[in-house]
Image (cartoon, rainbow, N blue to C red):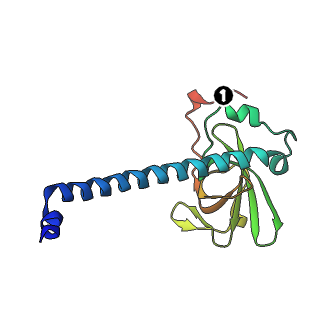
Amino acid sequence: METEKLFQSKLFKGIILGGALFLLVMLIFCVGIFVGAERANFSFAWAADYHRNFGGPESGFIGQMLSQNYIGANGVFGQIIKSDSTVPGQTALTIRGADSVERIILADKETTIMLQRKNIEISELENGENVVVIGEPNNQGQILAELIRIMPNINPPPKLQKPN
């Protein structure tokens, strides 16, 4: 009889509700830690593999990276500067981002490549095209592209163009 009163009391319900809220807050905290760790791992892998990906300084620039914000792990907006198909079935694109950082993008037959409203093949991409890439980071500091969208090349009005 007393156990029934205990389970129906406001104190018991408050303790259960408080415990559930505490577990929810801890779950959100753990998700935040996981996301932050993944972003840090990607930035570290990108810097550690910089020399292998781009032929940069062998020492990398971890020291420079420590004082900067994390780089975007899941995408980039920039200009195609190189296309390389050394691995069968996979194309590596080098993209120079808005921050002038070069990123390696890996595309395969599963990658959706869009020009306006139509899908195109990876072979139709050209150096100099502006693209937006969305994908997943890998452990080598590269992005496995899921979507590549070619942005139209809009020339500025004559007043804003730089003289040659």
Q: Quadrant of the C terminus?
A: top right
- Choose between 90 and 40: the one closer to the eye: 40
* Residue at screen point 84% across, 41% down: 56
45 horizontally vs 57: left or right: left
Q: Is residue 119 above or below residue 75?
A: below
Image location of residue 102, percent across then percent down: 73, 44
Q: Is residue 87 left or right of residue 35?
A: right
Residue 97 versus residue 111 in the image, above or below: above
Label 1 neighbour load within 10 Å: few <14, some 14-19, many 20+: few
Residue, x 73% and y 31% (percent of image)?
Answer: 64
At label 1, the amino acid type is Lys
Question: Foreground: 11 or 21?
Answer: 11
Q: Position of residue 31 (x, y in %)?
A: 48, 54
Circle count: 1
The quarter of the displayed image where residue 3 is located: bottom left
Q: Position of residue 59 (x, y in %)?
A: 85, 38
Left or right? Give the position of 145 relative to 26.
right
The answer, for residue 121, to whether it is visible in the render is yes
Q: Is residue 78 visible?
A: no
Label 1: which residue?
162
Q: Horizontally, is 51 left or right of 69 in the view?
A: right
x 86%, y 45%: residue: 55
Question: Measured from the top left, where is residue 80 in percent x and y?
Answer: 71, 50
Question: At x 66% / y 69%, what residue is drawn?
Answer: 121
